[in-house]
Amino acid sequence: MAPFCELRPLLARGDVPAPVVAPNGGRRQPRSRLAHRDWRSAFTEAARERGVATASGLPLQFVAADDAGATAYEAHIAATGRVPSRDNAHDLFNAMVWLAFPQTKAALNARQAEEIARDGVRDRRGPVRDAATLIDESGLLLAAEHETCAALARLDWRWLFGPHRARWGTLWRPFAFGHALIEKLLAPYKRLTAAVVCLPLAGASQRQVDEAAARWLRETPLSPPQLSHLPVLGIPGWWPANEAPEFYADASVFRPAHRCPEPRRAGAEGVAFNGGTP
């Protein structure tokens, strides 16, 4: 994991990919906050200004890494509102995502804390915590159409990146969510893959996506097979090389399409997740 001191010069120059600086799909984090030497305090103040809180309403604070003591990380956040944060890029990006998608992060934390309260911290997390961890670390929120979600579930890259390519960024809006995913975008590689939460909300705003994803997390059972997976450098606008059609011909990254069941459809305000494997 990159130390924050190594990241600071990049942030000061703005020499980082757009999905890193703007994981909320376009609204850049103020550079003064990103490059602040006491970034935990700067982000705590930003969280206070925005009213960011846990699912139970506790104001969010970013604190030293040892703040939780022997308490499980997610349980500590849920009980206190205090987010233990190391001085590195990984935890900085976690703070960024809390500010960008506060409702989704709060709902995700609540699900994790509920599982820990019921079952304790075990050697195996179980399907709910496994899925929650995938979303938290490697998640990408995609506001699109039912047909988009279905194409992603069956790995139909030709449909997604061929005739419908122009819909990316307008009708189909990808939002980097997982803080490990965002960190890896600092040194991207072609096989870099996200666990996708596909929302049937084509053209939705960041706030609408945050509300819909949080609602789904509160109301629906979780397990890893519910998530599709997408090589993120294939997203138009995220990597210059994907302008060439042959970029998608690499079957070791963009595996051939296959038939699988259609994703469960939700109402206009619901959320559909799709089957798939990493």
Image (cartoon, helix red, strand yellow):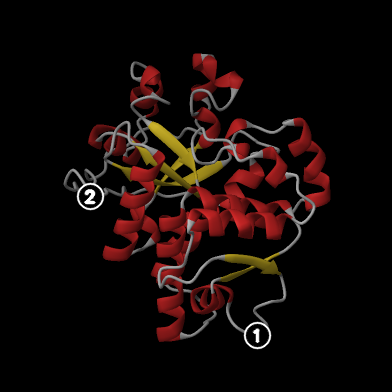
Callout 1 secondary element: loop
Give how far across and how far down residue 257 sits, in percent: 35, 33
Label whose residue precedes the other's in the sequence (1 or 2): 1
Q: Which residue is mark 2?
A: 270
Which residue is situated farthest in the front direction here? 49
The answer to whether 30 is drawn above or below residue 112 in the figure is above
Disc number at residue 70? 1
Measure the alpha-carbon separation of dots 1 and 2.
38 Å
Q: 171 or 135, which is in the foreground?
A: 171
On the question of residue 221 being in view, the answer is no
| Residue type pointed to by label 2 | Gly
| Residue type pointed to by label 1 | Ala
The answer to whether 205 is drawn above or below residue 94 in the figure is above
Give how far across and how far down residue 202 sits, in percent: 29, 33
Callout 2 secondary element: loop
The answer to whether 244 is drawn above or below residue 133 in the figure is above
